Amino acid sequence: MAVYDPGQLLAGYRSMCMLAGLVERGGRPAAVTPTVPLWAGEKQYGWFPVDVVGSDRLLAVVTNQRLILGDESFMLRAVTSLRPRPDEWALTLDVRGRETVEIVGPWVPWLGVVLCAEIHGAAWPPGYAPVIPAPRRARRLETVR
């Protein structure tokens, strides 16, 4: 993985955790102002640079119908498998009729949740049990009299 700013890594991971919680409660990702031409009924959720394993750093655009990596477009209905690795800021996609695609970057964990929400209606792929740190509990302080 290329060197990324620690603040970006933390922001992407925290955004993934918050979005995963929202999706698990029945919420949906929020659309943003489009940065690419969209098809009828298509909504864009975000765009950011990612490193494509075996290739270069490309701009990723995620919509409710496709994942665009540079000049290449992957229809979400053609994705047969998603394997997120949030602790490594990575996501592997198996796409029908295409080679496996692996992307890495600070916002890839968030992207994985968006794709799972669109493809599976859940924050994680079926059977996937992510290891995400639980929120810290407030410490109980006792007063001494």
Image (cartoon, grey):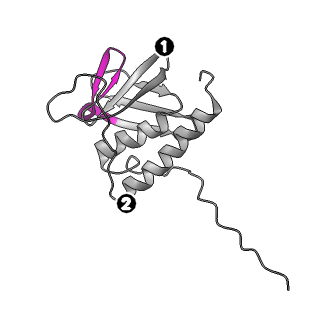
Q: Residue at x 41, y 51 (%)?
A: 127
Q: Nearer the viewer, mark 1 or mark 2?
A: 2
Tag on residue 25? 2
Left-right relation of 117 to 145? left
Residue range in magenta is 67-80
The image quadrant that residue 66 belongs to is top left
The three-letter code of the residue at mark 2 reads: Arg
Label the magenta part by its dominant secondary structure: strand
Q: Secondary structure at mark 2?
A: loop
Q: Give x and y (percent) for residue 49.
A: 46, 23
Q: Are marks 1 and 2 in contact (CB under 8 Å)?
A: no
Crowd rating for badge 1 (residues with CA inside 10 Å; few <14, some 14–19, many 20+): few
Indicate whether 128 appears above or below 40: below
In percent of width and height, residue 12 lies at 52, 38
Residue ID for mark 1: 56
- x, y (%) of residue 29? 34, 45
